[in-house]
Amino acid sequence: MAKFNIEVELDWLNEEMGLDEEIQKQVISGLQNRLVANLEQKFEQKISSIITEKAESIADEFIAKIMTDNIANIQMPIKTSSWGSEVNYLPLSEFVGKQFENAMTEKTLNERGGKAEYRDDKKYSIVEYLTKGYIAKELNSKVSDMIRDAKEKAEQSLIKNLEENLQQQLHADMVKRLNIPQLLQNLQNTIDCEVE
């Protein structure tokens, strides 16, 4: 059995109600306040998370729409000649594509991949430099690995076939030398002689 001591400070006591009723009223009021506070906190958290999620999705959709609309409409000015003042406008995607193509084909690199600074330097484009250097080395190493693997597999296959051939020939030779049919006939004759 458990025993509880409860201390209650009552500043005032309604004279119409008894002490038990006042304590009951205060306990119920305290419980209600706690429940309401807990529910308010849970609702605030849930509403906050829902609002944050909706706001983020709306913002993402808005930014995506603006980016696709605006990027598609951006026009880049390009001078038609270095001496003239006439300008043509290209869409951003086409402008970026042309700039990339120029960067890939313009010969500005030396043999080591640095910027060609001297007139006598042999000049390479990025594509030429990559194919001449890095990709060529990679391909050479891959091809040499493939050749080595093919050679090893061919050697192993040849050795395996030779072993199988030799074993078959040895088995045939052994059967021939042992003359198994003659041995069986002799064994049968010996058994027949013993039985008689």
Image: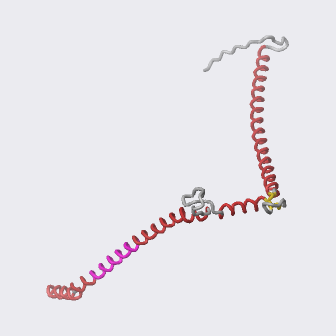
Q: In the visual, does 28 lie left or right of 142? A: right
Q: What residue is rendered at 76% in x and 45% in y?
A: 56
Magenta stretch secondary structure, dominant: helix
Along the line of sight, the residue nearer the viewer: 12 or 37:
37
Along the line of sight, the residue nearer the viewer: 159 or 78:
78
In this picture, which residue range is highlighted in magenta? Answer: 153-171
Along the line of sight, the residue nearer the viewer: 120 or 79:
120
Above or below residue 41? Residue 184 is below
Location of residue 168 (image quadrant): bottom left
Above or below residue 162? Residue 48 is above
Q: In the visual, does 131 lie left or right of 63? A: left
Q: What residue is rendered at 43% in x and 72% in y?
A: 150
Image quadrant in which the N terminus is located: top right
Location of residue 49 (image quadrant): top right
Q: Where residue 177 appears, x then y in whole percent? A: 21, 85
Q: What residue is rendered at 62% in x and 63% in y?
A: 125
Above or below residue 14? Residue 187 is below
Looking at this rendering, what residue extends furthest in the front direction?
A: 119
Q: Where residue 159 appears, x then y in whole percent? A: 34, 74
